[in-house]
Amino acid sequence: MATTEITVRGAGIFGLSIAWELTRRGAKIQIVDPHGAAAGASGGIVGALAPHVPENWNPKKQFQLESLLMAQEFWQDVQEVGGCSAGYARLGRVQPIADDAALHLAQARALSARTLWGQAAEWHVRPVQSPDWSAHSPTGMEIYDSLSARIHPKQACLALVAALKSQGVEVQTEAPQTAMTIHATGVAGLEVLSATHSRMVGAGIKGQAILLDHAAPDAPQLFADSLHIIPHADGTTAIGSTTEREYSDAATTDSQLDDILARARSAVPALRQASVIARWAGARPRSRSRAPMLGPWPDRPGHFIANGGFKIGFGMAPKVAQTMADLILDQRDTIPDGFEIRASF
C-alpha cells in the first residue's frame, strides 16, 4: 500500500491515531490541521480510559473493550518509535460504594464481568484497600476494575506526532488535496455536517477540568461523586469534568469548576491540601447518536469521517484507527452497528 496517498484532516486523537495506523501499514500520509496538533478537545488534561459497566452489552461496549485491551501495545509502540511518553499506564480504577443497593448492583456486575470480559480483566467488590488513596465509602467497600487505564491527553497526541515525524510525516497547516481524505475534525466537523443536513448531526459539549499538585503516579484512578480523578505519571492529578450543552465560550472556566474542585476535595481526603496548577476548558465532539461516527462520507466519493469521540475518544482510538485502516486500505468494513455515519445522519 506504499503508493496509497491519503490526507488526514484533523490532528486530534482520532486523526493522529488513524494516521499512525495507516503509516504503519505503508500508506503515504499527510496530516492537515490549521491549528496544529491537539489544539481542540484532545489537548485536555484528564485522560480517563475507563470501560462502560459490564451489563446490557452492545456493539459499542464490545468495541470499547477491544480498544482498551489494545491500548498498551498501541501506546508502547508509539512511545518506542517516537521517543516521547504518552503517560499511559493500566493501573485500574477504584469506585466507592455508597449503600446496600449499590453494593448489590456492584456484586451483580462482578458476575457479569466474568462472562463479558472473560480473562482479559476483572471487576472486584472488596473492602477499601488504601485509606491514603481512596474516596469516602459509607459502606467501607469499593469496586476495583483492572481494565481502566490513564493517559495524559496532550502528551499522548504529542507522542503520536513524534512517532509520525520519525516516519517522515508532519502536521501541516495546509496541503494539496489527495484522492482520499479522512475528516477527523471534531466539533468544527460536526458543525459542517449539521449545516448541510436537515437535522443536527452532532455538537460540541463543553467540559471543564482542573489539575492539582498531588503526586500519586502509581495509584489507580478514582471515580467518585461522578468525577474522574486521575493521577498522572508527571506527579499531577487531574479532575474532570463538567458536561455543558449551553455555553458562550468553550475555552473559559468558571464557578462550575470551583464546584468540581470542592466535590473532589470532599470525596478524597488526600486532595484537600493540593494546590491548583491549571484549569482547562474545551468543547468535545458528541454525535447525535452518542457513538463515534466512522465510515464513508455519503455522496462524497473518496471522503471518510471519523468523529464524535466525546468522552471516550482516547479509549476508542486504537480500535478506531484499526477499523478505519481496514476500511480504507483493505476495503474491509468492520464498523459496528451504531457507528455508521447513517446512525447520526
Image (cartoon, grey):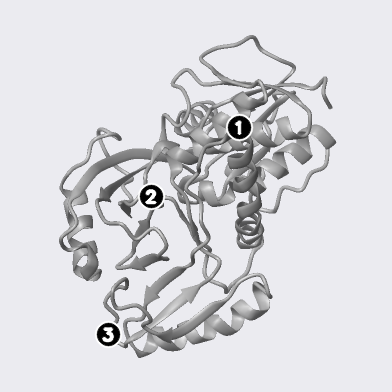
The earlier-in-sequence mark between 1 and 2 is 2
Disc number lying in front (1 or 2): 1
Q: Please tell me in which quadrant of the rendered image residue 118 appears.
A: bottom right
Q: Nearer the viewer, residue 35 or 85?
A: 85
Q: Within 10 Å of the Cα at label 3, are there few (<14), some (14-19), or many (20+) other Cα atoms?
A: few
Q: Is residue 84 shown above or below 274?
A: above
For image coordinates 62% across by 61% down, the residue present is 65
Q: Please tell me in which quadrant of the rendered image residue 26 appears.
A: top right
Whole-number angstrom distance, CA of label 1 to CA of label 2: 22 Å
Q: Secondary structure at mark 2?
A: loop
Q: Can residue 36 be seen here?
A: yes
Q: Is residue 286 found left or right of 74 in the rendered image?
A: left
For image coordinates 25% across by 34% down, the residue present is 248
User: In the image, residue 292 lies at what x, y percent?
Assistant: 58, 46
Instruction: Check disc 1 and give the amino acid type.
Output: Ala
For image coordinates 83% across by 37% down, the residue present is 331
Q: Is residue 61 found left or right of 225 in the rendered image?
A: right
Disc number lying in front (3 or 1): 1
Instruction: Check disc 2 and give the amino acid type.
Output: Val
Q: Secondary structure at mark 1?
A: helix
User: In the image, residue 263 lies at what x, y percent?
Assistant: 21, 63
User: In the image, residue 313 lies at what x, y percent?
Assistant: 52, 46
The earlier-in-sequence mark between 3 and 1 is 3
Q: Which residue is mark 3?
A: 138
Q: Secondary structure at mark 3?
A: loop
Q: Nearer the viewer, residue 60 or 91?
A: 91
Q: Which residue is mark 1?
A: 163
Q: Which residue is mark 2?
A: 46
Whole-number angstrom distance, CA of label 3 to CA of label 2: 26 Å
Instruction: Check disc 3 and give the amino acid type.
Output: Pro
The quarter of the picture where the C terminus appears is top right
